Image (tube, grey):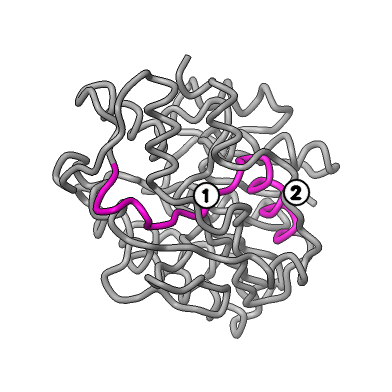
Amino acid sequence: MRVFVTGASGWIGSALLPELVGAGHEVLGLARSDSSATAITATGAEVLRGDLKDPEVLRTGAGACDGVVHLAFDHDFTRFAASVQTDARVIETFGAALEGTGKPLVIASGTPALPGHVATERNEPAPGSPASGRDATARQTVAMAARGVRPSVVRLPRTVHGDGDHHGFIARLIATARVKGVSGYVGDGTGRWPAVHVRDAARLFRLALEQAPAGSVLHAVADEGVPVHDIAAAIGRHLGLPTSSAPAEDFGFLGRILAVDQPASSALTRELLGWHPTGPGLLEDMDQGHYFA
């Protein structure tokens, strides 16, 4: 299969491209810079220069391929609503390009936050939760099954971890702890975060592309819920800092996310696609030390 990938040089894309190439697929990766193009070609993939703001480039990429994996998203949380709107336009462009072809369109979204409950693939995010902003685009994607597209949504947990994760939430928590001199958590620290290793997430995107029935909602979850207190304790242990509760304001935009209990299950995904995570869990991965190098 020839696959068009946005976000091809990003954190998950950098794991997905070798996964796809290793499985025998040809890959066309979207690149907006020379450095991104270099990273993409290093995996054995081809490059299409452009960005998400150019619908003609997106149509060209989708039209030249047998399927699309859309990973790119602007994670600037100071303008999150604008990022969601851009994402919706991109997804509609892909839907129109693939309409009537039966080709797969796989997009990334977020697992729901249902405090006190373990969210499943059948749940929708609670209003105002960290994942609710992208839920509309996920529903937009699933609805394309009626237009002759084979869409699926891969919901990612709060943390997609691994060696090389320099900008995710764990890296941000470590940076905050270094500045504050204490490894903090919000409230009593019992709120739970789901997590997955980046290689396991990449494999699920490949399986979704190859096998997922039209309209599938999938969860890339290995750890159902790691208490944020345990995450803070691991950070404190590696940095030689005390661990304590701290005001949500100390963490910027991340404080609101830290305060929400948001465990999630992937049982239905595992049954549907035979996906079984093999990478280290979040705390085990943190204890390998690469986050603190």
Q: Is residue 189 magenta?
A: yes
| Distance of label 2 from label 1 (alpha carbons) | 16 Å
Disc 1 on helix, strand or loop?
A: loop
Q: Residue at x 29, y 76 (%)?
A: 127
The image quarter in which residue 153 lies? bottom right
What is the magenta range?
A: 185-209
Disc 2 on helix, strand or loop?
A: strand
Q: Is residue 55 above or below residue 140?
A: above
Q: Is residue 98 above or below residue 41?
A: below
Mark 1 = which residue? 71
| Left or right of 276 on screen, residue 161 | left
Mark 2 = which residue? 2
- What's the mark number on residue 184? none
**Of 32 and 184, the residue lying toward us:** 184
| Left or right of 292 on screen, residue 66 | right
Q: Is residue 117 above or below residue 200?
A: below
Q: Residue at x 44, y 42 (%)?
A: 230
- Residue 142: x %, y % from top left: 55, 76
| Left or right of 63 on screen, residue 87 | left
In the image, farthest residue toward the top: 293
Q: Residue at x 63, y 53 (%)?
A: 222
**Of 169 and 191, the residue lying toward us:** 191
The amino acid marked with disc number 1 is Leu
In the image, farthest residue toward the bottom: 146
The amino acid marked with disc number 2 is Arg
Q: Residues within 10 Å of mark 1 (few under 14, many from 20)?
A: many
Q: Is residue 196 magenta?
A: yes
- Residue 178: x %, y % from top left: 28, 21
- Residue 52: x %, y % from top left: 41, 48
